Amino acid sequence: MKLSIKLSSQAPVQAGDDEKNQRTITVNPAHMGKAFKVMNELRSKQLLCDVMIVAEDVEIEAHRVVLAACSPYFCAMFTGDMSESKAKKIEIKDVDGQTLSKLIDYIYTAEIEVTEENVQVNSAPANSSACHTLRAHHIMHHFIYSS
């Protein structure tokens, strides 16, 4: 059996010599980006959303499966024995509303702008761009990358 794997913009890579049993697997690198774009459009229209995430006075409609797929924090929350796994409205106390909104936007778009205004800084000595960057990385690590 021949197995071909190709990216949509490249020629197939083939293994073996048996033409009769050839199989091709095509990988489209743009597929996931398009899928997330549609999911974000659905979210912006509040379609198929199954959870509301709340921080301070900010309420964000979202899809559990998207949040869980992109964030170990949300995956543990939605798939474990926590009460949040079934709740329709979940309050997050670890972060302010604006930052949570930016993080959820990042989950759907893979884009985030880190500015002095959208990064929490807890003390005056921490008021430098390096500290803002460290705080942003901490938030991203906690909600998106941590397990």
Image (tube, grey):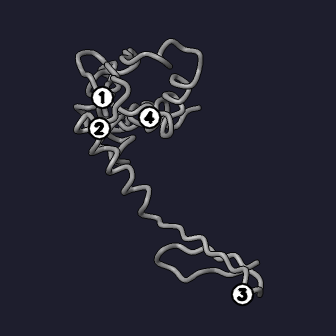
Q: Earlier in the sequence, mark 2 or mark 4?
A: 2
Q: Amino acid at mark 2?
A: Arg
Residue 24 — which label? Answer: none
Give me the disc on residue 67. 4
Crowd rating for badge 1 (residues with CA inside 10 Å; few <14, some 14–19, many 20+):
many
- Element type where label 3 sits in the image: helix
Q: CA distance from mark 2 to mark 1?
A: 7 Å
Q: Are marks 2 and 1 in contact (CB under 8 Å)?
A: yes
Residue holding disc 3: 19
Marks 2/4 in contact by CB < 8 Å: the verdict is: no
Instruction: Estimate the spatial distance between the alpha carbons at disc 3 and disc 1, rounded to whole Å.
Output: 51 Å
Q: Residue at x 51, y 28 (%)?
A: 73
**Label 1, on which residue?**
61
Q: Amino acid at mark 1?
A: Glu
In the shown orientation, is residue 108 left or right of residue 65?
A: left
Measure how far apart labels 2 and 4 are at the Cα level. 12 Å
Give the mark nearest the N terminus, 2 or 3. 3
- Dot 3 and dot 1 residues touching (CB under 8 Å): no
Gap in Å between the C-alphas at discs 2 and 3? 46 Å
Between marks 2 and 3 in the image, the one whose residue lies nearer the viewer: 3
Vertical placement of 130 versus 13: above or below? above
Q: Quadrant of residue 30?
A: bottom left
Q: Residue at x 48, y 40 (%)?
A: 70
Residue 145 placement (x, y as % from top left): 52, 37
* Residue type, label 4: Leu
Q: Residue at x 34, y 35 (%)?
A: 48
Out of 49 and 10, give the one closest to the viewer.
Answer: 49
